[in-house]
Amino acid sequence: MASPKKTAKQARLDARAQQIQRQQAREARNRNIVIGVFAFVIVLGAGGLYLVTNPPDFLAGRTAANPNAKVTDPMPIPEEGHDHVPDGSPIQYQHQPPSSGNHYSSAGAPRPWGPYKDEVPPGAFVHNLEHGGIVVAYRCSGAECDDMYKQVQDVFSKLTPHPAPTTNPTTNEVKFISTPYQQMEPKVALLAWDTEQDLSSIDFGLINDFYEKYRDHGREDVA
């Protein structure tokens, strides 16, 4: 039979062993919590970095079919005037491409709606902007111009016709002009009266959004 002295000593040893086990369990639990917190922070940081560098369309305000397309927000452009001048008269525009200003008043301006393979003079297409139309100007060279012309033809065919707001309200039309335009910095510029949005490529989704938002916002919303 164990002596009372040995029994008490064993009890102390058992208690000490249990205390050590509980301490080890607490340390392991705290260590797991710290590891879990660090892992969460790392995953959250990586996810945030990805969203910053690759924002989804609904965060970036884009509806581009090409998620890598470089897009600016529509920006207001100060008005440069709105007088009618004789066809062929020299007109100096401060901003290129112009989204307002003096413009031609002959039978050739405004131009009939549609895509144009050859460059439309700004004195003509600014008149289309005054009538509430949308202009897509694009900078190109060589065979690239033929390819971009085909792209804007496709865009024009997909845009929804709308009735003219004041004249011929029963006549549906697509109030859209496109033209090559070399005297500008952006690759593609979407124009409405006093408004511009720059793109790096022809993108139907973005052009359609711009068209639906800014069509019939000219100084003279007529056919």
Image (cartoon, helix red, strand yellow):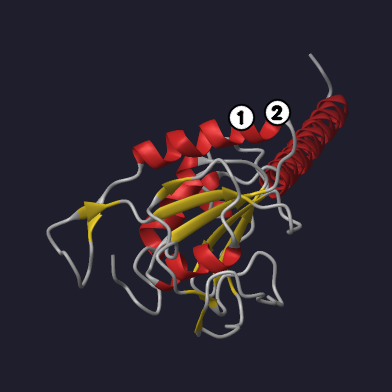
Q: Which amino acid does label 2 sit on?
A: Ala
Q: 182 and 24: which one is in front?
A: 182
Quarter of the image for the N terminus: give it: top right
Label 2: how many Cα within 10 Å (few below 14, some 14–19, many 20+):
few
Residue with the mark numbered 2: 143
Q: Where is residue 200 in the image (x, y as percent from the top left)?
A: 68, 45
At which x and y percent is residue 102? 55, 80
Toward which corner of the image does residue 66 lie, by quadrant?
top right
Q: Which of 189 and 93 is in front in this view?
A: 93
Farthest residue to the top: give it.
Answer: 1
Marks 1 and 2 in Cβ contact (< 8 Å) = yes
Crowding at mark 1 (Cα within 10 Å: few <14, some 14-19, many 20+): few
Q: Which residue corresponds to mark 1?
A: 147
Q: The C terminus is located in which quarter? A: bottom left
Residue 35 point in image, percent of width and height: 78, 37
Helix, strand or loop status at disc 2:
helix
At which x and y percent is residue 184? 73, 59
Q: In this view, does 183 lie to the left or right of 62?
A: right
Vertical comparison of 172 with 9: above or below: below
**Residue in view at x 41 percent, y 47 percent:** 114
State the residue at coordinates (38%, 52%): 113
For residue 65, say whether it is visible: no
- Under tag 1, what secondary structure? helix
Which label number is shown at residue 68?
Answer: none
**79 over 73 or under it: above or below:** below
Residue type at tag 1: Asp
| 148 sits left or right of 212 in the view | right
